[in-house]
Every structure is written in C-alpha cells, then in structure tokens.
Image (cartoon, rainbow, N blue to C red):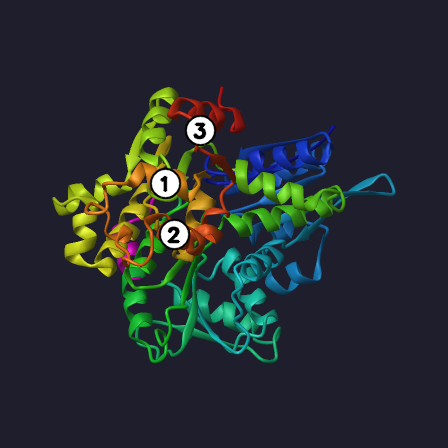
C-alpha cells in the first residue's frame, strides 16, 4: 500500500488525513496518510526516514521554506516561490530523490475560479509574507492582477517577498504595504497568516492589526463601489475565522480555505499517484464528507417542517438544536414575523446573517434555517462548506393547508386579493427554488411525519 504524510507544527488541526482517505476510497486506490508533528530542529532527521517510508509528503507551517535545503530538486513554481508544500519521492538508479512542488498555487487559482472571482486588472491586499503568502502572490500575478499590497508585521519580510516575485509577472506590481500606504480599488483581501487557526496562539495584538488593515481597506478609494469585495482566509479550521468575521462586519463577502485545501490536495495526489479517474465524484464526496457530520442545516419554505424535524432530529442524534428564527425572537423580544414587519426586511436579514455566522462556529448541531436565509448567495456557500444542507420540500397545496390562518404572523404571506394563497406560495417557491435545489439532498415532506423525515436524513447521512 502506498503511503504519505503531512508534516508541520502545529498539525493536530489538519484535515489532510481525512481528505486523502476519501480520495483513496472513491478512486479505489489503497493509500494511507497520517499527520506527523515535526519540530523544526528534527526536520533533517525526519526527511532521511521519510524517504524510505513514504511516496510523498504534504508540508505546512513552519517547514515550507526551510525544507528546500533538504531536497534534491524543485519544480519551476517552487523554485520561483522559494516555498514547498508538496514533496515527491522518486526512485532513480537505486537512489531515492526528493523533489519539491508547490500545489498551493494551483489550489488558490482553482478556488478563485470556482468562486467565479476574476481579478485580472484588479487590486488585491495580501496579509502575510511566508510560504503560503508567496504561493498566493505568485498565483495572483499569474492571473493578471494589477497591484498586490502586501501587509506584514515584519516589513523586512514584505520587502523580501516583493524582491523575490517582482520578476515573475510582467503585469503585476507587488507593493510592500503598511497602515500608511495609499491603496485603492481592492477587490480581494487574502489572509495567508496562521492567525485565527485552531491550535495557533492568536494574540489580541494580532487581531487588532487585522482590524486596522480592514479599516484602512474599507476606507480606500473605490473598495466598496460595489458589494463584491471578497475576503479569503486560507485557514479552513475553524471554518469561520476571526478574519472572516471582520470581513463580514465591513460589508465584504467571506470565503474560507476549504476549497483551496481540496484543490491543492488533488494536485498533490496527481503528483504522487496519477490523474483522478473519478474527479467529479471525488469533488462531491469531499465537499459533503470532509468536515462532516458536524452540522446539519434544514432549509425549505415556511411550513415545510424545518422546526419540527430539527427538534426530532437533534433529540435523536443527541446534538444541539438551533432554530435561527427563535434566536431572532430572543434578540428582538418579538416574534420573527413581528421583527420582519416592525423593523423591516433589511434589519431582519442583517440580523439573520449575523446569527448564521455565530451558528457556523458551533459543532454537532441541527440548524433550522429561516425560509429566506439562503437567498443571499454568500450564505448558501458558507452553509454548504460548513455542513450538510437538507431541503425539506412540499407542494404549494400542502404548504397552503399548513399555513392557512397564519398570514398575520407571517408577513411574506400577504398577497393581492386577486391572487390565491396557493398561487402566492407557488410564486415565492419559484423565486427560491434555485437556492433550495443547491442542497446536498432533498426530502419531500408532503405525506411524511417528522419522525419519518428524521429517519430518512439519518439513513442518507449514514449516522446510524
């Protein structure tokens, strides 16, 4: 059986063993992978033993740059970056050679592509100047970014990164930045530091620096001409980080590093084992199972049974029950309907967004979402990254019967006299159907009890 490992310090947070186990299972290729804590002083001795044991290594903090002196060769990208996150062991003439690669570049580019974010001709702010930051800066240049503002507590490291990369891209200007640097038109902010990572000692002074950088970017000319500015945290554990929270508070769209992790790992697999034979199936399985089951989100139209099923499911699993509408009621001291009616939809949706982000930080939870919570595309992306999304579906006729008599409590059910309640529900359903259909799976609840729906969810998720 082929085997590999991810090395770093700290390393307990790593999802890589789980990730490669899933790829191995879907591809039908026996492959074992483990996480190994390696202190910087032990790296040389470890590499000597690793050559005899593994076909390859994933490399993370703090070894991405230091490992280079212990390798026999480098790929072009790794050489240009001065950073390695993937090592390949090759047997040649009865000798095992080690070659360093950097799959973070492909991982970041693919994550941006899937997020449909084009940065060609645009400006980017990058926090960090270490190995991960180098890969991101290189990828950004390859994608045709105009200017990259590099923020780092150590300006000396920022300057070195600028010097090292300035010749790698003709159209991209790398600029060492601080809180006094004039910046403009930022469309993407990337955290390439370990600040906020599980198991990393993130100090208040570091978070304060984050906050100051965000304040500067928020006030920069052109940054918020639209609401399309994205914050991208390379960290994937926790899935919702302090960096992302600050981005949300400044009106930006938030993304974590889970997709980058997946795509850079697929590239590593291709280096060690060969091209994926079932790529789409692997991607679907990774997105659904990599960090799950941690959270189960129930979505659907009002009256579809979300609250009732969530209560039964949480009790059955022994997980925590969260109903976002009830959390809104707790905060406003009004029913969800009254909050919507008296405070307005804008207030309601903003509060709903804040509550959702609090929920994303909790594990082993069953969450009943408000019927319109996933209308905002960013909420849908965050939920799909954080847990399993289940769509509880029902026909308009069924929903009408369940909701009759509750129009006064549900403002969205108000409609013109010329339109029947069923027709009104059908129209609202058609507007939301595309979001609902993004769920991992769908259960039609028209003729089912809450216990039957619960049993189906548990069976589909293999939680027995």
Q: Which element is circle 1 on?
A: helix
Q: CA distance from mark 1 to mark 3?
A: 12 Å
Q: Nearer the viewer, mark 2 or mark 3?
A: 2
Classed neighbour count for the residue bearing mark 1: other residues with Cα under 10 Å, few (<14), some (14–19), many (≥20): many
Q: Residue at x 45, y 65 (%)?
A: 157
Residue 423: image tag: 2
Residue 236 rendering spot, x and y as whole percentages? 46, 46
Identify the residue shown where x is 29% and y is 55%.
Answer: 207
Viewer-nearest of discs 1 and 2: 2
Q: Where are the magenta residues, as a range?
A: 199-209
Per the image, is 172 magenta?
Answer: no
Of the two numbered discs 1 and 3 on the same chain, state the one appearing first in sequence: 1
The residue positioned farthest toward the right in the image shown: 93
Viewport quadrant of the N terminus: top right
Q: Is residue 361 visible?
A: no
Of mark 1 and mark 2, the one earlier in the sequence is 1
Q: Identify the image quadrant of residue 218.
A: bottom left
Quick one: 52 or 441, which is closer to the camera?
441
Q: Which mark is residue 447?
A: 3
Relative image position of residue 59 (x, y in whole percent): 58, 45
On screen, residue 242 versus residue 438, left or right, reads left
Mark 1 touching mark 2, by CB under 8 A? no
- Label pair 1/3, CB-CB below 8 angstroms: no
Label 2 sits on a secondary structure element that is helix
Vertical placement of 122 versus 283: above or below? below
Where's residue 188, x and y in %? 44, 67
**Quick check: is 203 in the magenta stretch?**
yes
Q: Which mark is residue 399?
A: 1
């Amino acid at each position: 059986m082929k085997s590999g490992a991810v090395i770093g310090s700290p390393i307990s947070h790593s999802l890589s063993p789980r990730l490669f186990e899933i790829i191995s299972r879907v591809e039908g290729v026996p492959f074992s992978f483990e996480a190994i804590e390696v202190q910087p002083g032990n790296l040389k001795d470890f590499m000597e033993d690793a050559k005899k044991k593994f076909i390859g290594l994933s490399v993370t903090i703090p070894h991405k740059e230091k490992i280079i002196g212990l390798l026999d060769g480098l790929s072009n990208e790794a050489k240009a970056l001065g950073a390695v996150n993937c090592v390949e062991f090759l047997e040649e003439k009865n000798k095992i050679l080690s070659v360093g690669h950097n799959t973070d570049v492909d991982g970041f580019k693919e994550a941006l592509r899937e997020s449909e974010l084009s940065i060609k001709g645009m400006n980017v702010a990058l926090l960090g100047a270490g190995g991960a930051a180098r890969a991101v800066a290189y990828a950004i240049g390859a994608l045709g970014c105009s200017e990259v503002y590099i923020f780092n507590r150590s300006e000396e490291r920022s300057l070195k990164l600028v010097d090292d990369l300035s010749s790698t891209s003709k159209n991209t200007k790398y600029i060492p930045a601080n809180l006094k640097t004039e910046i403009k038109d930022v469309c993407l902010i990337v955290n390439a530091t370990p600040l906020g990572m599980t198991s990393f000692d993130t100090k208040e002074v570091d978070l304060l620096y984050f906050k100051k950088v965000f304040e500067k970017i928020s006030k920069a000319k052109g940054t918020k001409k639209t609401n399309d500015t994205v914050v991208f945290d390379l960290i994937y554990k926790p899935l919702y980080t302090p960096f992302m929270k600050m981005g949300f508070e400044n009106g930006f769209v938030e993304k974590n590093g889970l997709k980058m992790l997946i795509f850079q790992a697929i590239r590593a697999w291709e280096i060690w084992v060969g091209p994926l034979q079932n790529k789409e199936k692997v991607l679907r399985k990774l997105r659904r199972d990599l960090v799950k089951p941690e959270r189960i989100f129930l979505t659907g139209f009002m009256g579809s049974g979300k609250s009732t099923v969530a209560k039964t499911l949480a009790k059955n699993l022994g997980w925590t029950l969260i109903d976002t509408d009830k959390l809104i009621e707790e905060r406003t001291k009004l029913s969800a309907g009254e909050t919507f009616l008296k405070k307005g939809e804008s207030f309601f949706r903003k509060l709903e967004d804040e509550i959702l982000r609090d929920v994303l930080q909790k594990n082993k939870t069953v969450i009943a979402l408000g019927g319109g919570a996933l209308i905002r595309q960013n909420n849908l992306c965050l939920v799909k990254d954080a847990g399993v999304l289940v769509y509880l579906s029902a026909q308009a006729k069924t929903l009408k019967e369940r909701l009759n008599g509750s129009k006064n409590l549900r403002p969205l059910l108000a409609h013109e006299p010329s339109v029947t309640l069923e027709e009104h529900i059908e129209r609202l359903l058609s507007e939301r159907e595309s979001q609902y259909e993004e769920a991992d799976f769908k259960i039609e609840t028209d003729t089912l009890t809450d216990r039957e729906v619960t049993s189906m969810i548990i069976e589909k998720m293999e939680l027995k």
